[in-house]
Amino acid sequence: MLAQERRERLLAEMRREGLEAIIVYGTSWQEAYLRYVSDFGILEADGIAILTADGRCRLFVENAAEAERAQVEANGIDTRLVRNLAQAVGRELEAVSNQRIVAAPRALLPAWLTASERSFRLEDGAGLLDRLLMEKAPNEIAVMRRAVALADEGYEFFRSAARPGRKQYEVVADVEAFLRRKGSPDNFMIIGSGNADVRGMAPPSERTLKLGDLVTTELTPAIEGYLAQICRTLVLGKANPVQKQAFAIWHEAMEAGIAAVKPGVAAADVARAENDVFRRHGLGEYTTSKYTRVRGHGLGLSTDIKPSLLEDIDIVLRPGMTIIVHPNTYHPEAGYMVLGDVVVVTESGCERLTRTPAQLFEMSA
């Protein structure tokens, strides 16, 4: 039902824009557009979906296993296994070549489809899809609430799994199993453990957790294709004064960022509110790309949709956007620390969805 609601919403936008068709491209690292239109999260090779103004949706894939999975998971979609993705899609577009067609993301499509000699012309439709991905409908937000609640549960389980003597991959494997038992078919998760020698998080390794370590994680479970994230830092033992003082800055920065979230505010303003806290504490260097990627980002049908929270991103926040505010970066004495909560932009401000306390956790005796 949610997938059908998304398509109806997109069809309404197509009618307003005078569009006959929209084609969307997807791969395992750029899945949001394809999932929005076809309700299919591709894992292998590439896929393209065409949605026409009459409501028909056709999904083209080159991988036999993906075709079999799509026929089960993508309800109401005409799935086709093809040898040449570009040419198969091109043949379909020939029938509407004299009408307006947009593509998202156009830049990633096979070059054959965008070549000037084609009889059809593909305009860039990424802006339309980006807006729909960012500004969620009420039923989408309801699913996001469930995903955030599962992220909270997942972190509580993580705290019980992270113990001295265990390897990173053992902890992550336990969390993955827990989330799958809870009904999440997907989870993006990275981890870090150590102290000042650790400058970030990564996929799990064989590094053994030790007493005194800062253990950081970003876990992102999915409910009905919608992903929600939580970022927290745990000390294996009692936090020392340096760790406590550093974390207080992270907490101040996150709260400043969340306080800045409201309709009409640019993503840059939220990032600046976070970064200004670090600058006031003499840590402005650690807000640069040398040490950190973003100060937060959108969430939904992908782990990282627009807007990115950076000081040069002028996307304006609007009601229905769900974003995580996370001042994750390196501290020269304590090491890499993370803290992040999910909020939804409302008509007057924002609502915090994350329920896990925003604190520096310590391992209980």
Image: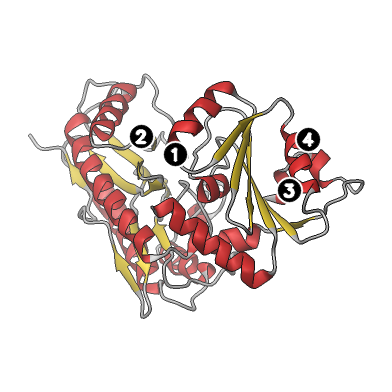
Please report the residue visible at 28 percent of the width from the left and 46 percent of the height from the top. Answer: 151
Residue 144 at x, y percent in the picture: 34, 55
Which label's residue is closer to the chain start, 4 or 2? 4
Kindly identify the amino acid type of the residue bearing the numbered disc 3: Ala
Residue 242 at x, y percent in the picture: 28, 48
Please report the residue visible at 10 percent of the width from the left and 37 percent of the height from the top. Answer: 364
Identify the residue under disc 1.
200
Identify the residue under disc 3.
107
How many circles with numbers are drawn on the protein?
4
Is 9 in front, or is 324?
Answer: 9
Which label's residue is closer to the chain start, 3 or 1? 3
Please report the residue visible at 35 percent of the width from the left and 34 percent of the height from the top. Answer: 185
Q: CA distance from mark 3 to mark 1?
A: 31 Å
Q: Is residue 324 left or right of residue 22?
A: left
Query: Of all residues shown, which one is farthest toward the right?
Result: 117
* Mark 4 vs 2: CB contact within 8 A: no
Residue 272 at x, y percent in the picture: 49, 68
Residue 172 at x, y percent in the picture: 31, 28
Q: Secondary structure at mark 2?
A: loop
Which label's residue is closer to the chain start, 2 or 1? 2
Residue 79 in sight in this render: yes
Given this view, does label 3 or label 4 mark the residue nearer the observer?
A: 4
Q: CA distance from mark 3 to mark 4?
A: 17 Å
Mark 2 Cα-neighbour bin, 10 Å: few <14, some 14–19, many ≥20:
some
Q: Secondary structure at mark 4?
A: helix
Q: CA distance from mark 4 to mark 2?
A: 32 Å
Q: CA distance from mark 2 to mark 1?
A: 26 Å
Given this view, does label 4 or label 2 mark the residue nearer the observer?
A: 4
Kindly identify the amino acid type of the residue bearing the numbered disc 1: Gly
